DNA sequence: TTAAATAATGTTACCGATAACCTTAAATTA
DNA sequence: TAATTTAAGGTTATCGGTAACATTATTTAA
């Protein structure tokens, strides 16, 4: 590896002079600067960020931790975070926790150990609390995305989960549906809890009874085994006429399960869900959804993170909370009764 | 920040002893080990990877550089790479070049400067050559994914682009199509070139003429402006009865454009493409595709990368090339003439 | 009983950069 | 012309670890 000492020797200056040329600090004559630059090019010099971070006590690296890299909601969010990070001159790295608290812990370790300057986290759920506490203890600024974690105050960008759920249920009732089921993420995930609340509120407002067996609390991430969904369908008697899915992944799995038993959507079962499917929904606009502004989650979250980093140590600015709306997109997956 | 010196002082030992406890090297009495461990916990010690990498000359970090984080092909690939990296005890970070050579350069800089131990690269295209040369010059092991770059030998995992294109065209001709158009990625991308070749070969084998105006060479990534596709549709006279899209993104954009002018798929225009849409194809199985084994691209690529890293400096093992098959999945986007 | 081996720990130098301070010569200013 | 500034650069210490070698008891073998 070529170091500033190699450059210095070949250019006949001290290492400090090379450092000054690299960082455009101090006073350097044009002649010296040019000579150093030329030697740097000749030797293909690349600064060693580790050495630099060690002394500067900052890495210029930011992390984005998402829970499902195959979910278009999160990848679109990632694009937003990326654009905002770039705008502020930060490098952004991604990590994928797969909705798995253990993996999340590994990434938090990586983040601490690489001394990242800040993190954007979509936490796996309430059990992520210790990880966030670790970040806080080590004074790593972070902004939560999409999910809150009870017991941890911080900046956060959320979607209007409760309102979105109500919109979905209202849409179904407006089409004449009265038996409406909900398949949801884990109750240990704040957004799932709010979606359940919204669902219950909407039922009440529409004078519909709440029925326990019509609600399945499972997990937001993709699974290979559909048996819990199958068992749930078996349990419901009579079957609902419509299902609300807590996110796009669950919607897909419900469809797979229904197709497996020859139940057609929307003819025999209506289906709506949270989150659009990215560009792919355009192929054959089918699923009626409440779309969240995924890109904005990432963009605004990153903006808040950078603000936090840049005013570090200043008078404690209060935590900010941004709630983004969820908008109905009516397509073809709901039939009128 | 807590350092080994803080631990050492509080535990009444030297820093070296702490280092030995952390790394399980050398001989340490059980009593000392226990004491050091306890102090480490008390102080919430986290090793500084930058300091460690600086002296060890390796970071234990691997990178995966993809060109479109919103494309399910690449996100599925990423999951494969992640699993394989984890199996070998490496940390994996992602970067998204957005099919943009400039962004790719930024990531290569980040990779060099953070002294990553190796990289998995889906190159933006032939103009990526200088970046790969930079990596090679700095002796960073890398494996190419999905695309080759002329002028750069290396390990690589490819899909059978030519064969896949032939399968798509053959399927269309078997359904009676004779006017078959191709919308493809940039000719500076190796997979796009091979797909064009496969298309031409298949036309010839089916005794169909090759018509220049039936081929549009554009870009694989998502765009906001559809005017080039519109102009292409205008140019073709008579219109083809079927279109082959060089990847899933292009297929989506063709559909958007067709819908805009009220042309229905498959009734008025048949459409097939490379790469499946991930789980979302299940929602409403519509697009007929040749599916590549995205997960395997990542998994096998990572495996090759780790091998390269671990035998670094040994007698130059010849470059390996893996070609993964592309398999037809027939759905509903092709009509029979 | 004494030399050699081993266990357990400490010391020093170094990885590659930068901050803080120091030096020297040239340019200004009084 | 002497006293100050300023420009251009150098020296040294340090960031947080680890390798290599050194030291000191304590065993073990001869």
Image: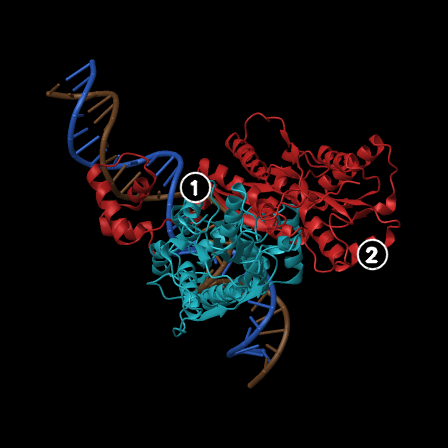
Chain colours: A cyan, B red, C brown, D blue
Same chain for the residues under marks 2 and 1 in the image: no
Residue drawn at point x = 57 percent, y = 42 percent? B77
Residue B317 image position (x, y, % from top left) = 59, 26
Q: Secondary structure at mark 2?
A: helix
Q: Identify which residue, B246 or A246, lies in the foreground.
A: A246
C-alpha span from label 2 to label 1: 49 Å
Q: Residue tagged by mark 2?
A: B231
- A36 in relation to B80, above or below: below
Q: Are marks 2 and 1 in contact (CB under 8 Å)?
A: no
- A307 in relation to A34, above or below: below
Which of the image's four quarters has the N terminus of chain B?
A: bottom left
Q: Identify which residue, D15 or A266, lies in the foreground.
A: A266
Residue drawn at point x = 68 percent, y = 33 percent? B160
Residue A34 image position (x, y, % from top left) = 67, 57
Q: Chain of mark 2?
A: B
Q: Residue tagged by mark 1?
A: A227
Q: Identify which residue, A154 or B318, lies in the foreground.
A: A154
- A312 in relation to D14, above or below: below
- Answer whether residue A67 is visible to the viewer in this image: yes
Q: Identify which residue, A255 or A66, lies in the foreground.
A: A255
């Amino acid at each position: 590896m070529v170091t500033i000492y190699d450059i210095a020797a070949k250019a006949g200056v001290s290492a400090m002079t090379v450092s000054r040329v690299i960082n455009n600090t101090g006073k350097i004559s044009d002649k010296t600067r040019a000579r150093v630059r030329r030697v740097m090019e000749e030797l293909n010099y690349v600064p060693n960020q580790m050495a630099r971070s060690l002394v500067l006590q900052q890495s210029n690296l930011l992390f984005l931790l998402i829970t499902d890299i195959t979910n278009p909601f999160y990848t679109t969010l990632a694009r937003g975070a990326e654009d905002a990070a770039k705008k502020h001159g930060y490098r952004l790295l991604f990590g994928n926790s797969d909705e798995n608290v253990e993996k999340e812990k590994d990434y938090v370790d990586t983040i601490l150990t690489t001394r990242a300057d800040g993190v954007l986290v979509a936490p796996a759920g309430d059990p992520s609390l210790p990880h966030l506490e670790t970040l806080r203890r080590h004074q790593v600024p972070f902004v939560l995305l999409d999910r809150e974690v009870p017991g941890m105050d911080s900046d956060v960008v959320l979607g209007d989960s409760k309102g979105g759920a109500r919109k979905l249920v209202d849409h179904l009732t407006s089409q004449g549906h009265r038996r409406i089921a909900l398949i949801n993420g884990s109750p240990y995930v704040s957004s799932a809890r709010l979606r359940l609340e919204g669902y219950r509120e909407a039922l009440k407002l529409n004078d519909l009874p709440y029925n326990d067996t019509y609600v399945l609390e499972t997990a937001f991430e993709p699974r290979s085994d559909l048996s819990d969904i199958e068992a749930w369908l078996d349990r419901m008697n009579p079957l609902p006429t419509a299902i609300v899915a807590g996110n796009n992944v669950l919607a897909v799995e419900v469809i797979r399960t229904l197709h497996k038993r020859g139940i057609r959507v929307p003819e025999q079962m209506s289906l709506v869900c949270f989150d659009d499917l990215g560009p792919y929904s355009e192929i054959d606009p089918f699923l009626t959804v409440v779309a969240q502004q995924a890109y904005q989650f990432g963009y605004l979250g990153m903006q808040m993170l950078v603000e936090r980093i840049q005013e570090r140590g200043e008078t404690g600015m209060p935590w900010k909370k941004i709630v983004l709306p969820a908008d109905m997109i009516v397509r073809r997956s709901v039939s009128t009764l």
